[in-house]
Amino acid sequence: MTKAGLRASAALGLIAMLGAASNVRAQDQGSASGFTRAEQAAIIKELPPEGTRDAADSQRGFLATRKDPVILNAAGKPVWNLDAYAFVTGAAPLTVNPSLWRHMSHLKHHGLFKVTPNVWQVRGFDVSNMTIIRGTSGWIVIDPLTGTETAKAAMELVNATLGTRPVSAVIYSHSHGDHFGGVKGVVDEAAVKAGTVAIIAPAGFMEEATSENVMAGGAMLRRAAYQFGTGLSPGAKGQMGSGIGMGISAGTLSLIPPTDTVAKTGDTRVVDGVTLEFQIVSGTEAPAEFNVFVKPEKTFLAAEIATCSLHNILTPRGAKVRDARAWARYLDEAATRYAPESNAVISSHCWPVFGRAEGTAWLSAQRDNYRWLHDQTVRRMNRGETMVEIAEALEKSPPPGNAKEWSTRGYYGTISHNAKAIYQFYLGWYDAVPANLHPYPPVERAVKLIDALGGADRTLALAENAMAAGDYRWSSDLLQNLVFADPTNAKAKAMLAGSYEQQGYQSESAIWRNQFIAAASELRSGRVDRNAAQSNDLIAALSTQELLDSAATLFAPERPGRRNYTVAIDLTDRKEQAVVEVGEQAIIGRVGALSAKADVTLRGPRRALLALLFVKMPVSVVSGMEGVTIEGDKAALQSLIDSLDPMPHGFDIVTP
């Protein structure tokens, strides 16, 4: 595949790019302010009783870990460091929220852990966990991590510690890349095609794994760099994990299509002699997802609808809003149907909960948390409160369970962000205030606002007063507008970086912290684009219709050139045919029979189509590719290529 690749592959390679980081210059970073130190001290006083469950459960069953903590790719470059968070010991530094520091002290453990007699987990080898079940003849692997390199290293640890066995089956719990991307690190695709290895996934997996977020790939990748702290080094002033894992590996994303799918809760499969029962939870954390009850071992895998943190109803990187009410309902089903029969409840992130009563209580607490978020948001919404008002109110009066249960706290998702997401789920972004119906765009509004405040100097003075009072939320609001109005104002950018940094230091959510500190870094040092690694497996899995629809999002009708013509496409390697109609304002792609009235016909392998639409390779070059013929008006085909924007390569966020 060529370097430019696809818009779609950029979106689907999202997870693969997030582990590559470069150091943020330590000398640019500030210390915790007096207000931040006071905030950290106050947080300590309101945290739940420490207890011993998390400390014990996060290390229970430890058997072994890898001797060399650094995992390399085929080129000898590191993709993962098991000891990246070894510095998290002792009391929290003043630049880290003490609750997040405690959380990371348990999340940092890595290695192979025994859960029940024939169930193990490899944790800390990626953002997700790999679950291993002993079958009659081999290993059943659930969720083979993000990259092939970390998955291979995890499997080597399993075989070295427990005895070498072949992999007899792989199970994808859901359609996110960190739960299937490492599959080729644990199994050979030839064995799957030969029928000796089964791959099981929830119904709709392939469609969702290849299409969720394709259209929004460019924007999502850029925002994900903030969410996961790409470019930030782990440290007391840097990245502190992701809230549900240490970080995301920079390995090679792969995919092998499932050989079997499950569509109904209660359906069972006997896999390599082990009876598994599935609970369908699609439409919650992922659009295609199931939980797995390992019946002989009385072990329930809650996939990602229950972890050691409140999750995201809407991720900061961007995605479709999730259904909080359905999420709570599925958790209730898990708590009443599966947990009472389970000696351990495990997840695809974080550590297990042991004991039937304990697992039931844990799932129930998570259920109550999502139900509280949903019901209280809707209650206030129906009273006329806006999403911002609701988020503020709920954040100031968190549910009683948060005073008792660590796992309901917002290390990943937050009450504030989720309340706004639930409001959006029902009512959209508009709060019914007409002034917000058609506001000025950010830069134009910022210019007008700064002028109304009395100019840049006056705004800086107001921001300085806010920072002196410890009101970082207001100072960053003022300063962000000033930077948008005048991005050359060095003092405003420096002050804004400092304001964001203090908010990052105070954040309990790891991904809120990442976003604040990533913004501060870019204000000081500028943006560094980091393009995603390409995944040929995912590109191959995308339907041709999705490729055509993705290309249509690159169409720039304002560009001069020819319009109102038709391109016929004959993909000889796939035995597929399609038509692209280029109009005045949109491109319509349609998979189906070739048009006899087409102005030009492209025949050849799909790579030729990719080269034209996404690499913008000239028609004269593509026509010389092996197996390619172009019949008719070649100028029409070139006109199509000329009308497309190049693939996006990042954009500014905290500067206009």
Image (cartoon, rainbow, N blue to C red):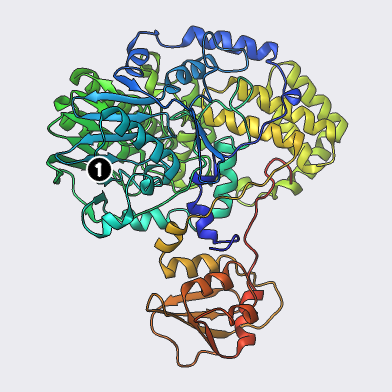
Q: Residue at x 32, y 48 (%)?
A: 187
- Could you tell me which secondary element the residue under label 1 belongs to? loop
Q: Tell me where residue 553 appears, x and y as whole percent.
A: 56, 65
In this rendering, the answer to whether 510 lies above or below 636 is: above
Question: 560 or 60: nearer the eye?
Answer: 60
Q: Tell me where residue 312 appears, x and y as whole percent.
A: 44, 36
Question: 266 or 57: nearer the eye?
Answer: 57
Query: Would residue 454 be visible to someone looking at this image?
Result: no
Residue at numbered disc 1:
166
Q: Is residue 124 left or right of residue 118?
A: right
Q: Amino acid at mark 1?
A: Pro
Q: Is residue 611 left or right of residue 31?
A: left
Q: Tell me where residue 37 appears, x and y as whole percent.
A: 64, 11
Q: Residue at x 66, y 22 (%)?
A: 502
In this rendering, the answer to whether 606 lies above or below 422 is: below
Dividing the picture into quadrants, the one containing residue 551 is bottom right
Q: Residue at x 68, y 21 (%)?
A: 471
Question: 487 or 617: nearer the eye?
Answer: 617
Query: Would residue 417 be visible to someone looking at this image?
Result: yes
